[in-house]
Amino acid sequence: MKSKFTFIILLWSSVFCRAQYTWHALPAAPISWRFDDFYFLNPQIGWAINPNYDNIAPNQPGRIFKTTDGGSTWLELVDSSNTFYRSVGFADSLIGWVGNLADTTYYPSIGGRTTNDTVPLYQTSNGGITWAPANLPHPHPAGICGISVVTDSVVFAYGRWMSPAGYVKTINKGGSWMFTNMDSMAFGLVDGHFFNADTGFITGMGTDRKAIILYTVNGGSSWSYVYHSTRSDTDRVWKLYFPSRDTGYASIEAGGTANPYNTWFLKTTNGGLTWTESPFITSYDEEGIGFINNDVGWIGGDIAKGTYVTYDGGNTWAVDPAFGMETPPYVYSTGFSINRFRSFGDTLMYASGNTIYKLDLANTGINEILNKNQNISEYPNPATTSLTIASQSPINQVKIINLLGQTVYSHEFSAATVQVNVSTLPSALYFVKVNGTVVIKFVKE
């Protein structure tokens, strides 16, 4: 009996825990070679942007989309053959910004320029219907790779991943902006994360062409290095993600000076004051990173190798097939390059790559934390025909839920001790909800 019980518990740990985290592409979401960024103001209202990839993916103009129903439907707001939309953020339902890479360099490998548009930041005051250049000072960043909406008034916009390095900041919802030149500390800036208007981080590449994370506690008046790579590769810290105040992760996009190059990711457990490097996947184009809690998260970016998931805080990684991966010969227009994750609490998360993906834990049927209440006991466990549940207070309802999140038993009671007939249930692990809140588990043999 003991060995069978242990096997079922292990089965639950390896199957059910992972079954909670199933991504799906939103059926009506638009398609692109890559959506570089998206932003949800709340679980229902959001915007998604893809750059102009015409030079490498035919019929891929820069576009801005909006949803008002959690991604069920999308409305195309802007179609531009001239703009490399790189980042997006909104202060409220009307006022928002999109960043433009604004790289007008001619690249022979792609047969053209990334964009001819040199405006680094656009602003809207009507929810994205129309856009105009933001009122930036001179000088200002040449392009914007990342936007952090800290409050409904305070916004940072960073740029760009290649030189020059700097950012602009507004404290009045885009009415005016202040520019900070960061060339003395960075070659390029990519992303950022702020806990509040004073305390936050920006990422990128240092002046020595090595990956960096910079930290401020005074709203950007001064910055210090909290991570500075010592490796020779021309790496850059690409994205930051904090599932909690103390625990954070960062992806490092490798420069690839070694072949095959090694890739790394970063983790902090003290609120970003120190970071630990850990190896990732050899020869991987590492970009987007996101964690739904301190332990479960994803790294994406490489169209050939797929998106990877960890369930143990980054100790081990495996391919998550939900996102798909490219197969040779690689076709830009069908890539799965995941560049951004965003979440609401620990139950709802979105990701952007070739389309918009959603992770909604509420759909599993069991999203409560297992809570062994000391006032409730169940026996025998495992059970074969009958399960007794005893409580110090009246039991009004008992529901039994299987590993698929389906309710297989529901009954109303009015007693402190009740007996539940489980004789007809298949042998498996089940969850029992008592009075709709307390969740316990038992094994049916």
Image: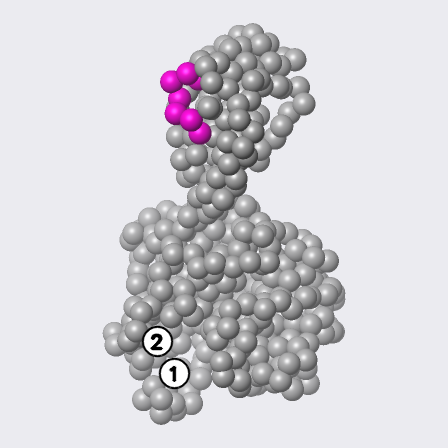
Q: Is residue 117 above or below residue 76?
A: below
Q: Is residue 438 above or below residue 327?
A: above
Residue at 65% x, 68% y: name it.
277
SS for tag 2? loop
Residue at 39% x, 30% y: name it.
406
Q: Indicate whether residue 425 is drawn in magenta.
A: yes
Q: Indicate whether residue 94 is drawn in magenta.
A: no
Q: Residues within 10 Å of mark 2 (few under 14, many from 20)?
A: many
Find the magenta span and give its range: 422-428
- Of 45 and 442, nearer the camera is 442
Are the two marked residues, 2 and 1, in contact with CB atoms closer than 8 angstroms?
yes
State how many labels appear: 2
Question: In x, y percent, where is residue 329?
Answer: 28, 76
Residue at 46% x, 64% y: name it.
300
- Whether residue 126 appears in this view of the structure is no
- Whether residue 24 appears in this view of the structure is yes
Left or right, 82 with reference to 347: left
Q: Is residue 348 above or below residue 380?
A: below
Indicate which disc, 2 or 1, sits on the residue closer to the N terminus. Answer: 2
Which residue sits furthest top? Answer: 415
Q: In the rendered structure, find residue 114 and report the number of the disc placed on it.
A: 1
Question: In x, y percent, where is residue 129?
Answer: 36, 62
Left or right, 328 with reference to 445: left
Chief SS of the magenta region = loop
- How far apart marks 2 and 1 lie (CA) works out to 7 Å
Residue at the disc numbered 2: 52
Q: Is residue 51 above or below residue 380?
A: below
